[in-house]
Image (tube, coloured by chain):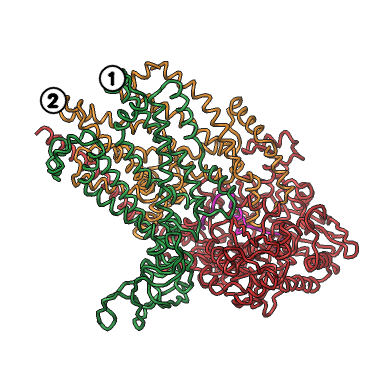
Chain colours: A red, B green, C orange
Amino acid sequence: MKQGKYLAVFLVLITIITAGCSNNNAKNTAVQTNQTPKETKAAPNSEPAQSQASGTSAKEAPMLVSLVSAGTLPPLEERLPEKPDVMVEPVVDEIGRYGGKWTMAWTGPGDKWAVGQPTEEALFRFNKDGSGIEPNVAKSYEVNENSTEFTIHLRKGMKWSDGVPFTADDVLFYWEHMLTKETFGKKIYDAYYSVDPVSGDKALATVTKVDDYTFKVVHKYPSVQFLERVAIDNKWFFAPAHFHKTILPEFVGEAKALEIAKQWGFEDTTSFLKETGYYYWLYPQIPTLRPWVAKNDPNGDQFIMERNPYYWKTDADGKQLPYMDQLVATKIQDPSQRLLGTLAGDFNLSTFGAQDFTVLKENEKKGDFRVIPWQQPAWSTSGIQLNQTVADPNLRKLFQDIRFREALSVGVNRSEIAEIVTNGIADPIQASVPEGLVGYQDGWADQWAAFDPDRANALLDELGLTKRDKNQFRLFEDGKDVTITIMDSSQDNAKFTELLKKYYEDMGIKTNVKIVDQATLQELKYSNQVPASIENISVVNVAFRPDTLVPLRVLTPWYGQYGLFVSTGGKEGVKPEGDVAKILEYWDQIKAAKTTEEINSLSTEIVKLHMKNQWIIGYAGPTPTLVVASNKMANVPQNMIWADEFRSLGAAHPAQFFLKG
Amino acid sequence: MKPMTVFGRQKPANLEPEGRKDVNYSSQWRLMVLRFKKHKLARISLAVLALLYVCALLAQFLAPYSLESYDSKYVNAPPMKLRFVDADGKFHIRPFVYELQSTRDPDTMRKIFASNPEKRYALKFFVKGERYKFLGVIPTSTHLIGVEQPGRIFLLGTDALGRDMFSRILLGSQVSLSIPLVGVGISFILGLIIGGVSGYFGGWMDSVIQRIIEIIRSFPTLPLWMALSAAIPPRIPVVRMYFYIVIIFAFIEWTGLARVVRGKFISLKNEDYVVAAKIAGVGDAKIIAKHLLPGLISYLVVATTLAIPGMILAETAMSFLGLGIRAPATSWGVLLQEAQQIENIALYPWKIIPLATVIITVLTFNFLGDGLRDAADPYKR
Amino acid sequence: MLQYTLKRILLAVPVVIFISVIVFYIIQLPPGDYVSNYAAEMSVAGEVFTQEDMAAMRADLGLDRPVFEQYLIWVRDIVVHGDFGFSFNYNKPVMAVIQQYMGLTLTVSLVTMAFQYLVAIPVGIYCAVKQYSAGDYFFSGLSFLGMATPHFLLAVILMFLSYTWFGDPLLGLFSAEYVNAAWSMDKAMDLAKHMVIPVIVIGLSGTADLIRVMRGQMLDELNKPNVVTARAKGLSERKILLKYPTRAALNPIVSTFGWSLTSIFTGSTITAIVLNLPIQGPVMFNALLGQDMYLAGTWLLFMALLTVLGTLISDILLAWLDPKIRTEFRGT
């Protein structure tokens, strides 16, 4: 009996515990269901009320109005540049309303460019179709006839985000005390050098102040593309002198600079100056010209940027931009969280790769967002680059043989790759310049693109790879293995490499795929241990950004050690020969060219050499980047190009995005 | 199997009567076998496990397709229905599947599949298919089940490369079921010996061993894996790489067992019967084997059966971190890692099916361990 | 007992030193270093790092020195200044980074741990006492299910279900509006809501383990002579149960309790990554991946200390629980 009683008590206890647990759960879920609708309702309710109160006629955000009336902020007219110098930003669809937050995901401060690019304000920026540049921070410019003198005008009355005037002194300060002194860990950009067409002599430009709002850049030799190069290499050709004077060792002394660095939490001045001089937009202390400025520590779980009260752009109605109050970047640890957060409406404007197309599209209605594809200027999305200077002499001979590259190209069924790897989004074409860009060649996309395993095998036999080992893999004539080792740093391409391996091994070419982390891959590239890579080429115009198509440095796999040879001035690496040497010759001519036409025709010649040699083999064409915007988010443009050169999402001018009521 | 009120202690009522008289004279192991036979769930589990292992052994034969049967036509196809009645209502003795036709939704690019009732493919046994080596030795191309070309049968749907999930699960079990046994075996032996020595002899030996265990426990495993995966040459068979990882895993895992064994040894070695044996001059080895081990056998059994599924799960976690096995080689960890993408859970839920096999395996191992534990209990009569 | 404790603590010192050496060595093992990682990360974003840039950066950060020298400097700073070094990734002192995440880490860990023990021990006892009852099967089955499902998948599935049912995947520990807000009732409620999935995912597997072990041990102990004797003496069942078998059955649980200290800090790493929890696990994971070595090193050292400490605590607890071991201690 006693035992029975005990057990009964015990049972009751257990039931209470478990019931307690389930009750808690029930309560929690109840809270969820109750709260969610309440929250979503509350937000829109309060906002329209505000904006109605301030009226559509208000020229500045409600949050600033109250600051002005409290006397902590000067009135709008004093914050904007002088009337004729205010920049009027065209809106994509309609004049917007103030308020709201742009919520996005980022992976933390390492992801600086995710908030950096959309908020960037360059001296000159690319125009909408990317064909040329237009003044942005600069008001206007004049160039002399032979492109050696550039006179650049700034906007009168324009101010930094802390209210201090922005003048030519800020440009000169940047040039004299930061850029040419290389304080922030970057070498003086190539754009500031001009080249003598005859002797090849390189000369650094001089920068002089004309008056408070005008400065002049003078090159020794013609530099036709100077402004475009600046728009890519050195977007911000200025820095807040009044701030940097308080931290640069040149002004405060080494010891004091270190002390300041320590106060900021840094260990040494070099990384301190690099962070403050280059990645300045992450630090709330540093004034900028951007539409939103940092508000809190970027290392937190949520990085907030808030509107710049001194922002110097308005819409056509004279309303000061940006429309949205804040940009809130929430830290995520796994890409799936960006997706899930977007589906749930936590993030109202984010970007995705094409692999998420179907799941996003299927949830478009439920998630109340729209998927806007932006084209990429990529040559391919799935392809292979064979290192032309691979260490193994047998392989090098093989990789340099055009027949081998043709065999690898025709031996792979592109339709299967495009269907499986890109989910049918990409076209089954050869790596080539997409239509509409400089260097586009009719018919290139179909070169060696048809699946023809017989031809592939015939070509390989012709190359003398007729011997086979016991697994039917081909051998060199001297009996050594023919093995292509593909190095990659991510598992995201597993589908593609798996298929590639299958097709190559069907041809009898043994294929290994080795995944290493990014850092290792980089080291392997420098030590010439990357025989093949599946990296893709994405470039708007070779003349703007040559380094993936012209062997100027090390990191692009196809030219391997040729790049090292050029970047070390011939001390290390492999001397370029044949068509690769020709590419370099063309590049030297581009640097010294006198007209845009000349540059374009030379660029086309470089591209044609790529077409002839097909060092970069592509198996599927470009796929778009997906800009996913909540249906409340307005003024997000369509039919844009997603390119780093155009600052990715920044090309859409996010200051004029707004949230509908 | 009604439990008696006395603390749930089993009354011996259910012991087979014919075995009854042997009981008093049987060895400990014989008793264990007898008691194990009574444990229904454990018996079922043993049968299921045996079945799983047989399937793993014959996987190439049982699976209709190989691991490299990519096909863009059948990407992300849902499981097919095995039918007996066709569109006209006619009954067929031999089950069949309809031809699968795929199109793409032009808007969302999702593959849409429809069965074509015009074309039936009957399920056949001993079909000729892709070549493989039966039991790794005999080259053949006969598969247990399949349908005639060009028909396809996907009992559990396909993955993102158009491979049959059913085949992948079967073939993946070869890795997932075999290698954990090795890992657990190693950690079991190490833990038992070292923990036993530590607990039985005590003194400085104990101190040294305990410090070593502490050091090993504090080993940062993650950078170790990373170093390993970078150091291993590319052409090494992935399965062997996983094998290495499991061995390292075992070398760290044994410490847990060793500590418990030690604790048990310390408390048991002062029991009267052990002290008596010692005084009687029985050797250490014999005392350990005869008097101490039986005392903790039940815990060891529970610990090992729990460790095997732990190892299976560890493999899935490794796959999540991008270490270990990589496709096209397949293990259940690889399959689960693929399944965990939001896209798959949202749009192609059949990719979670491998989870069921993992759960079943882990459950049966546990029930088996449970049965063994009960059987090994020396106080149960 | 006191003497034993002292001796154990003294012994722990060389162990910790040895561990710190190993830890530092292992962090360096994977190829590359922080600078090459950083350069690789930046090159993805389109920036160019030449080998010279990297060499200069190494020199600035002191990474060009030999490993043992870096180790000695690190240890010297710890001992002399109590300075655990600098996190390159965060551009902050290591201690500041660890502090930043400590509060929430402890919250998550303690809640899940409490959940585990509070559920597992009573359920384990219940399952043993009522062996083969419907309740036993139910709880055993449930605990097995929790154990059999890989964390990361369970987390993703629960997150997705939460999204489909409630429209909110419950990412992280707070809703966006509360992340930077001051503490309030609403924020606490929000935290509680977000804790449900982590507690289920992290807690369930541990619970399963504990229930199994507890049940197995209880079954062993329930039929022992001391229990029978106690019952014969007429002690109440409740008292018998709590005094003898439960105490003895706790033995193996206690002997690994010390280690669960570290496992609650690191064991949930994968789940935390999947669920986007702002706790130490993922931070350390990234530090290891990026070879942010002082951060990773300090953390691993801290873990090692906890392990040593945990073992110590376990031993002392064991001695307290098991009289037989207590005499053993007296002997040494």
Would you say residue C184 is visible in this rendering? yes
Amino acid under label 1? Ala
**Residue, x 31% and y 24% (percent of image)?**
C322
Q: What is the x, y in percent for residue A445?
A: 64, 76
The tag on residue A262 is: none
- C-alpha span from label 1 to label 2: 27 Å
Q: Is residue C150 magenta?
A: no
Q: Is residue B17 left or right of residue C98?
A: left
Would you say residue A331 is visible in this rendering? no
Q: What is the x, y in percent for residue A604?
A: 75, 73
SS of the residue at dot 1?
helix
Q: Disc 1 marks which residue?
A: B276
Q: In the image, which residues are magenta?
A: A101-124
Q: In which quarter of the image is residue B163?
A: bottom left
Q: In which quarter of the image is residue B38?
A: top left
Q: What is the x, y in percent for residue C267?
A: 43, 42
Q: Residues within 10 Å of mark 2 (few under 14, many from 20)?
A: few
**Residue, x 38% and y 64% (percent of image)?**
B62
Q: Which residue lies furthest to the right in this view?
A: A199
Q: Which chain is indicated by disc 1? A: B
Q: Is residue A122 magenta?
A: yes
Is the C terminus of chain A in the top left, top right, bottom left or bottom right quadrant? bottom left
**Circles 1 and 2 on the same chain:** no
Residue C108 versus residue A487 in the image, above or below: above
Q: Disc 2 marks which residue?
A: C232
Q: Which chain is indicated by disc 2? A: C
Amino acid under label 2? Ala
Q: Tag count in the figure?
A: 2
Q: In this view, does C244 lie to the left or right of A350?
A: left
Q: Is residue A386 left or right of residue B337?
A: right
Question: Do callouts 1 and 2 mark residues in contact (Cβ within 8 Å)?
Answer: no
